[in-house]
Image (cartoon, rainbow, N blue to C red):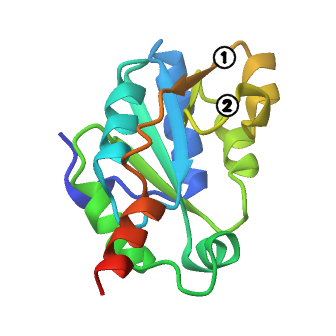
């Protein structure tokens, strides 16, 4: 198993490793998100995603893109802390950070064999679907655990205050 510091890679390094995995016949799975306030729904996503291949790559939004997408009060945890938490998740093999609102550039560079999103997404809404499918890959939607979401968790915390 990799040491924690080897999980977070720049896209350029990860692209080279991804090429090797392809040559070895390994199936690369990809998912992405903000992963602010990691909860059971996220773990469910990672566990189910990992079942679809050999290597799970998770792309994580940087702090500025989380703020653009989720609002001024987010992220709750800064990127370094989110990465530290995600590094400890055994289902995740590699992490890569992105600053855009979507992981389109990363998906285009890696062309994973399986692109996974949570059940709150419809297949035609999944960024990178077209590129992945054109390269022979597929999209998998993992059933969403409605009772387990960051928004619900934050709401629960603020309601108690």
Q: Residue at x 68, y 41 (%)?
A: 107
**Disc 1 packing (10 Å; few <14; some 14–19; many ≥20):** some
Q: Secondary structure at mark 1?
A: loop
Which image quadrant: the N terminus? top left
Between 154 and 32, the one nearer to me in the picture: 154
Query: On the image, numbered disc 2 is attached to which residue?
Result: 111
**Quarter-of-image position of residue 54:** top left
Question: Is 35 left or right of 63, judged from the image as shown?
Answer: left
Q: Residue at x 23, y 57 (%)?
A: 4
Residue 33 placement (x, y as % from top left): 54, 54
Dot 2 or dot 1, earlier in sequence: 2
Query: On the image, numbered disc 1 is attached to which residue?
Result: 137
**How far apart in space, not on screen, are marks 2 and 1 (Cα)?**
8 Å
Q: In the rendered view, tell whether residue 62 sits above or below residue 125.
A: below
Q: Residue at x 34, y 41 (%)?
A: 93
Residue 153 placement (x, y as % from top left): 36, 64
Q: Residue at x 75, y 40 (%)?
A: 127
**Quarter-of-image position of residue 137:** top right
């Amino acid at each position: 198993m990799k040491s924690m510091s080897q999980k977070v890679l720049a896209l350029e390094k990860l692209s080279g490793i991804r090429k090797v995995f392809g040559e070895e016949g390994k199936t690369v799975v990809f998912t992405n998100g903000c992963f602010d306030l990691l909860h059971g729904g996220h773990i469910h996503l990672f566990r189910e995603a990992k079942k679809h291949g050999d290597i799970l790559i998770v792309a994580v939004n940087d702090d500025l893109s989380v703020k653009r997408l989720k609002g001024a009060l987010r992220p709750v945890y800064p990127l370094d802390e989110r990465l530290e938490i995600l590094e400890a998740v055994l289902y995740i093999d590699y992490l890569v950070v992105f600053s855009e609102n979507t992981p389109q550039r990363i998906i285009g560079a890696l062309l994973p064999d399986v692109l996974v999103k949570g059940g709150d997404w419809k297949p035609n809404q999944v960024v990178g679907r077209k590129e992945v499918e054109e390269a022979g890959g597929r999209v998998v939607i993992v059933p969403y655990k409605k009772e387990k979401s960051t928004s619900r968790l934050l709401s629960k915390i603020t309601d108690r205050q």
